[in-house]
Image (cartoon, rainbow, N blue to C red):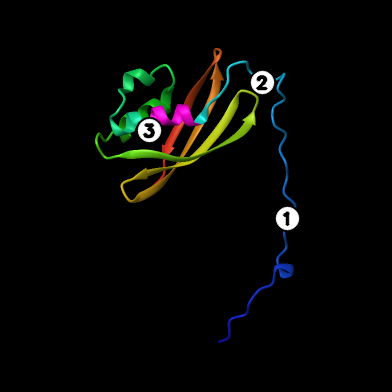
Amino acid sequence: MSLRMWTLREYSVATPVRLPRPRVEDASPVLLDPRRLLSAVVEAVDGRRSLGQLRAVLRGPALEEVGRLFSPGVGVRLGTVRLCWVSNGVAEIGGTVRQRSRVRGLAARVELVEGAWRCTRFQLLP
């Protein structure tokens, strides 16, 4: 059996679709800093920050998930962070965390609620 090398021309490449970013005048005056928000959440997972400090930022399922993931002293550190706007007032954040020699993915959804950004979903991927 012979392996065939593929050339770039043989792939069908779909044209990327650009989603409109929220216009500045439509955006909230409350700025979203995804790295700062996720840093606080990861610190709570690692036990370096109390969960009570995040009650104003985490809502419903996100608060329950962070409480479930609580593992003090494991050494969880935030890696890369990416932000994707879903709509005005809603964004999804993806990123990585380092846990000793292991790298895991994370996903979060943040929504603008009562004039402040709240994390409504948080998941640490296997």
From the top left corner, tell me how far across and down residue 12 is, in percent: 73, 63
Residue extending farthest left: 73
Q: Which mark is residue 42?
A: 3
User: What residue does disc 1 label?
Assistant: 14
How far apart marks 2 and 3 lie (CA) works out to 27 Å
The question of residue 38 being in magenta is answered with yes
Q: Residue at x 70, y 22 (%)?
A: 24
Q: Secondary structure at mark 1?
A: loop
Q: Secondary structure at mark 3?
A: helix
Quadrant of the rendering where the N terminus is positioned = bottom right
**Amino acid type indicated by mark 2:** Ala
Above or below residue 77? Residue 50 is above
Task: Pick the residue in front: 8 or 36.
Answer: 36
Please state which of the two labelled residues, at mark 1 or mark 3, is closer to the viewer: 3
The question of residue 2 being in magenta is answered with no
**Amino acid type indicated by mark 1:** Ala
From the top left corner, tell me how far across and down residue 64 is, in percent: 36, 28
User: What residue does disc 2 label?
Assistant: 27
Q: Residue at x 48, y 31 (%)?
A: 35
Q: Secondary structure at mark 2?
A: loop
User: Quick one: label 2 or label 3, which is nearer the N terminus?
Assistant: 2
